[in-house]
Amino acid sequence: MTKKILPYKNHLLLHMVILFWGFTGILGKLISIDAFSIVWIRMLIAFVSLFVYLKAIKFSIRTEPKRVLQFIGVGFIVAIHWITFFHAIKISTVSVALATLATATLFTSFLEPLFFKRRIIWYEILFGGLVVAGLVMIFNFETEYTWGIITALVSAFTASLFTTINGKLVSKGEKPRNITMYEMLGGTIGITLFSLFGTEYYPWQVDPTFNDWIYLVILGVVCTAYAFVVSVNVMRELSPFTVSISINMEPVYSILLALLFFGDDERMSLGFYGGALLILSTILANAWLKKRLRTKRANALQHSPN
């Protein structure tokens, strides 16, 4: 039984991470401060906790200055993704933002071939389309929220972009823990600079309650630092497209958790179950098809003449 599970170990780890990310929606609802401040504190806590942890275990954080700048740059992209996502929710609805965010899968199906210099795979386009269809079934997609949709599309693109870039960085042998730590630092720096020079609002001036701090620590340490490290680490074995398409289960997990925490206020329709089944089936089909194709290629190479 264990041997049967092991080939899917990275898939299981990825979905554990996505479950943690789904829990961020619950935490976001419980935390009383604004979204901009949440993202800044979230990334700061994630950076500090990773830095302390890596120093405590004497894990080397030395990296080439060029790489550090690359990681910090990706951190800017991560921060933009989180801020635009929360902003899209505020100017439209959660349903519109989450449904539009599903387009990250389609963005990845084009970005991954560009970064990894391979051809576009037809079934990735098909699976990406099916995921979008599944999320449209789950959520009541309101096209009247034009700016919410545009903002969510920016969030989807940036999510796809940093996922693909991280896949490229990992393929070059970079350490996932260092990547995550410097990206969290980069996001914190990016938001700080934007606050200082682009707005008159400073996230460090907010006054979270005691409960807010508990939720923020969970958000920063478990749902961000730990989850982000694992998500980057599994990309040693899983492609950026597989990671991206799996992340579309986040709203499903989030709504299930909301139902658990908030009861009848989060009761779902039959459309949710139909959409969730379509998304889950697509993700499983993607994992199964990629595994089968890898097996066929391995067998072909094994039996090919030397």
Image (cartoon, rainbow, N blue to C red):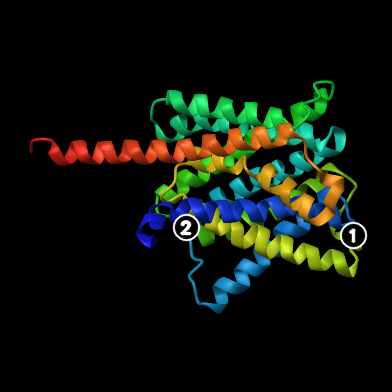
Q: Which residue type does callout 2 highlight?
A: Glu
Look at 83% across and 35% down and name the residue there.
93
Look at 86% across and 67% down and name the residue there.
211
Taking the view exactly as shown, the residue that stands out farthest to the left is: 306
Instruction: Tell which circle, 2 or 1, labels the residue nearer the N-terminal end.
Output: 2
x, y percent for residue 58: 50, 77
Q: Nearer the viewer, residue 14 or 155?
A: 14
The image quadrant of residue 213 is bottom right
Residue 61 versus residue 190 in the image, above or below:
below
**Quadrant into which the N terminus falls:** bottom left
Number of residues whose C-alpha sits closer than 10 Å to that of mark 2, classed few (under 14), some (14–19) or many (20 or more): few
Q: To which residue does mark 1 refer?
A: 205
Q: To which residue does mark 2 refer?
A: 64
Looking at the image, how many numbered discs can be counted on the residues? 2
Look at 27% across and 36% down and name the residue there.
296
Local SS, label 1: helix
Q: Which residue type does callout 1 highlight?
A: Gln
The image quadrant of residue 143 is top right
Local SS, label 2: loop
Number of residues whose C-alpha sits closer than 10 Å to that of mark 1, classed few (under 14), some (14–19) or many (20 or more): few
